[in-house]
Amino acid sequence: MTKSIPNAGNLSKTEELLQNIRQTPLFRQLIPQEAGIGLPIPLRKQGKVYAILPCFGFTPSNEKGKTAIFPPFAIITIDWQKQIPVEYVNLRFRYPETEFKWDTQIGIFPHPLVAEMTIGEYKEKRRELLAMYDEMFEKLESNTSFTSEWINKFSELLNILIEPSLIPYYRVFGGKFCERFLAKS
């Protein structure tokens, strides 16, 4: 990955990844800078661990303090160990004739589960979840099991923080992950 954003040692590896991916040539050439980057979807493949990052559209809403959310238009897969992109998929090219309505708003941020939180509360929960992603990636790399307490806490945070309108797309991109950690819809 290109230059790291200084973090004074207080960001998780996942949080750094979500910031630093924007500095990569791939992101700068193919993804609008104003695009949103969703929560990672872990993938274990051929003995390696990857993070799939959905990129979605968003724009300020007519309602003050709200942001309109649009479907993911691309995914970037990152080699977790090396922290480098290994795959870029333009979803509009791959799925031109699907139910994905690219220009249709699918949701609003903040969604109901986070709308009543202060910005500080939201950031704290997000930081906690991203630190738990670090633990998840480490456990996947070492083929270590998760405790039921860890699974419950991760699931709780994920289900609070994930944008509900993006969940159907997450289920397409990471079915096993969603089956295990997201509430059934």
Image (cartoon, rainbow, N blue to C red):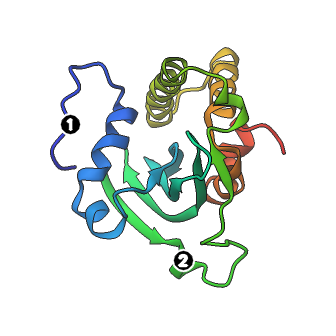
Q: What element carries label 2?
A: helix
Residue type (three-letter) at the residue carrying disc 2: Arg
Q: Identify whether 140 is placed above or below 80.
A: above
- Percent coordinates x, y for residue 48 in the rendering: 42, 48
Q: Which residue is drawn at 74% across and 44% down?
A: 179
Q: Which residue is drawn at 66% across and 68% down?
A: 104
60 to the left or right of 155? left
The residue indicated by pointer 2 is 92
Q: Residue 159 shows which numbered tag?
A: none
Going from N to C along the chain, the mark reached first, 1 or 2, is 1
- Percent coordinates x, y for residue 184 in the rendering: 83, 41
Q: Identify whether 63 is placed above or below 154.
A: below
Mark 2 nearby-residue class (10 Å; few <14, some 14–19, many ≥20): some
16 to the left or right of 64? left
- Percent coordinates x, y for residue 145 in the rendering: 59, 26
Q: Is mark 1 on a helix, strand or loop?
A: loop
The residue indicated by pointer 1 is 5
Q: Which of 86 and 107 is in front in this view?
A: 107
- Tell me the distance, in whole angstroms, between the alpha carbons under discs 1 and 2: 30 Å
141 to the left or right of 117? left
Q: Residue at x 51, y 47 (%)?
A: 38
Q: Which of 119 and 180 is in front in this view?
A: 119
Residue type (three-letter) at the residue carrying disc 1: Ile
Query: So how many labels did they put on this image?
Result: 2
